[in-house]
Image (cartoon, helix red, strand yellow):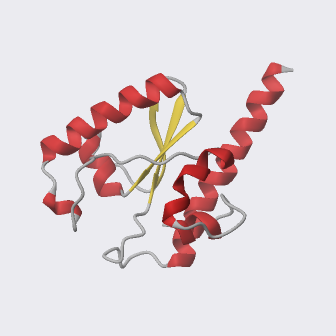
Amino acid sequence: MQITVHLSGFTPRLMKPAEQAELPAYGLGITNVVARATARADELSAEEYREGGRLLTEKVTRLTPRWLAVVGVTAYRAAFEDRKASVGPQERVIGQTRVWVLPNPSGLNAHWTAATMAEEFARLRVAAQDRAAQDRAAQD
């Protein structure tokens, strides 16, 4: 995922997985919908996803980011019980936090290339920058 984050313009350089702790300096944070590591998403139960969505909602409510990006439409649909969700901005908000679903950069996701994933990640980056500018303007 680091290459997609970089190609989309979120970071000025390609970061290593071990550098994840540096992401907040770029206004980014990463967490999992479900904490249990698996080789494939279908190894997780519906209950694990729902509980992950509940815990993520609590975290977002507490931290109040401008945007929550969920990587993987299948994970989002299961965690938030929204079967009609698709990649892109969602109608759902958590408090004042907007929600965006991004494609999963897993090698199992053959529908998206690195370039098209970077384009979708970049759409979120632009929306996030626009919202930050609107928030700053509203404070002035």
Residue 98: x, y in percent?
53, 36
| x 59%, y 34%: residue | 66
Residue 93: x, y in percent?
47, 31
Most distant residue in the right direction: 140
Let me know if residue 120 appears in the view.
yes
* Residue nearer the viewer, 21 or 50: 21
Question: Taking 63 as reference, is 19 above or below it?
Answer: below
Residue 6: x, y in percent?
63, 67
Look at the image and tell me in which quarter the C terminus lies: top right
Residue 90: x, y in percent?
46, 43
Let me know if residue 84 appears in the view.
no
Question: Taking 66 as reference, is 112 above or below it?
Answer: below
Relative horizontal placement of residue 76, taking residue 132 as reference (left or right):
left
Most distant residue in the front direction: 18
Relative horizontal placement of residue 72, taking residue 19 as reference (left or right):
left
Question: Taking 126 as reference, is 117 above or below it?
Answer: below
| x 53%, y 27%: residue | 64
* Residue nearer the viewer, 81 or 1: 1
Q: Quadrant of residue 108?
A: bottom left
| x 37%, y 58%: residue | 72
Q: Quadrant of residue 58?
A: top left
| x 16%, y 54%: residue | 44
Q: How many marks?
A: 0
Q: Quadrant of residue 139?
A: top right
* Residue nearer the viewer, 68 or 83: 68
